[in-house]
Amino acid sequence: MYYLYVLKNESTGRYYIGSTNNLERRLQEHRKGKTRTTRVLKTYSLAYKEEFETEQEARFREKKLKSYKSKRYIDWLISKDAGP
């Protein structure tokens, strides 16, 4: 199983978008500061995830989300996933 995931920093409102085959391991790497882009602000939390059968599908979705210039779509995606 492969995952697309979105981390959100509550204090800045910034997002980090990534993909992995082991979500728990990858989240631990973020928390321990092993990822350069999230090292400075370690207060990221998992805001959204999607599961895929193949790495190719997960990476394609990651690139698609990263291609959006506005964070409004990501805000909408996360709020839609939260449900009523």
Image: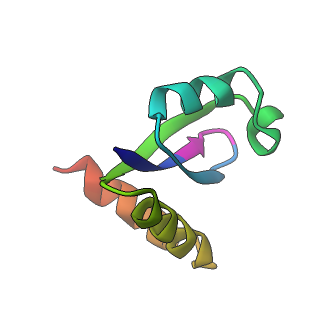
Q: Is residue 10 magenta?
A: yes
Depth order, front residue of 19/1: 1
Above or below, 8 against 39 in this view is below
Above or below, 70 against 28 in this view is below
* Image point (66%, 31%), residue name: 30
Q: Position of residue 28 (x, y in %)?
A: 60, 23
* Image point (44%, 60%), residue name: 58
Q: Main secondary structure of the magenta part?
A: strand
Q: Position of residue 33 (x, y in %)?
A: 77, 26
Which quarter of the image is occupied by the N terminus?
A: top left
Could you say which quadrant of the image residue 38 lies in? top right
Above or below, 14 against 7 in this view is below
* Image point (46%, 65%), residue name: 56
Depth order, front residue of 22/35: 22
* Image point (46%, 41%), residue name: 21
Residue furthest to the left: 84
Q: On the rendered structure, is 49 left or right of 16?
A: left
Q: Position of residue 26 (x, y in %)?
A: 57, 32
Q: Is residue 60 magenta?
A: no
Please say which color scheme the image uses: rainbow
Residue numbers of the magenta segment: 7-11
Q: On the rendered structure, is 43 left or right of 49?
A: right
